[in-house]
Amino acid sequence: MEYMRVWTEIEVDDVQKHIIMVEDKFGHCPGCKQIGIELKDLKKCPGCGREFKYVTSKDAKSGKTEIVMRTKKKLPDLIFVDYDDYDRVTGKKKAESLFNI
């Protein structure tokens, strides 16, 4: 199977509330900060119960697709979010909140 990036508008808040960050073999939950989460068929965080809908990885930067393909095999129901896009949009949102007092 081949992969291609598809652009669609989604709510950043929803992504932030339902994302898991993955490395090569394990993930971590941004909600409760639990690390070392086993990825195979994961639906919820074992620590806080956060429902996962999205996944991203810092290792997927610069067009590296190996981590994307491995992650999609382990978590086929989750939507893979480009890390650079996620980092840019969430960073912008944090900056805006600093000025909206």
Image (cartoon, helix red, strand yellow):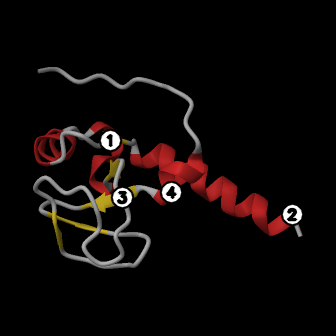
Label 2 CA crowd tier, 10 Å (few <14, some 14–19, many 20+): few
Which residue is label 1 attached to? Answer: 80
Vertical side of 63 occupied by 48: above or below: below
Secondary structure at badge 4 equals helix
- CA distance separating discs 1 and 4: 13 Å
Neighbour tally class for label 1: few under 14, some 14-19, many 20 plus, Cα within 10 Å: many
Frontmost of labels 3 and 2 is: 3
Marks 3 and 1: which is nearer the front? Answer: 3
Question: For the point 53% across and 50% down, which residue is it?
Answer: 14
Task: Looking at the image, tell me whether mark 4 or mark 2 is earlier in sequence order.
Answer: 4
> Label 4 is placed on what type of residue?
Gln
The x, y position of residue 82, in whole percent, is 39, 42
Label 4 packing within 10 angstroms: few (<14), some (14-19), many (20+): some
Report the mark closest to the observer, 3 or 4.
Answer: 3
Dot 2: what SS? loop
Residue in view at x 12 percent, y 48 percent: 74
Residue 44: x and y, percent? 28, 62
Question: Which residue is labeled 4 in the image?
Answer: 16
Whichever of labels 3 and 4 marks the residue nearer the N terminus, that label is 4
Q: Nearer the viewer, residue 25 or 63?
A: 25
How far is mark 1 from mark 2, CA to CA? 30 Å
Distance in Å between CA atoms under marks 3 and 4: 11 Å
Label 4, label 2: how many angstroms apart (C-alpha)?
20 Å
Q: Which mark is residue 51?
A: 3
Asked if disc 4 and disc 2 are in contact, CB closer than 8 Å, the reply is no
Question: Which of the two discs, 1 and 2, labels the residue nearer the N terminus?
Answer: 1
Q: Residue 3 bears which disc, if any? A: none
Q: Quadrant of residue 31?
A: bottom left
Q: Circle 2 is placed at which residue position?
A: 100
Query: What amino acid is found at the position of numbered circle 2 in the picture?
Result: Asn
| Residue at x 79% of width, y 68% of height | 98
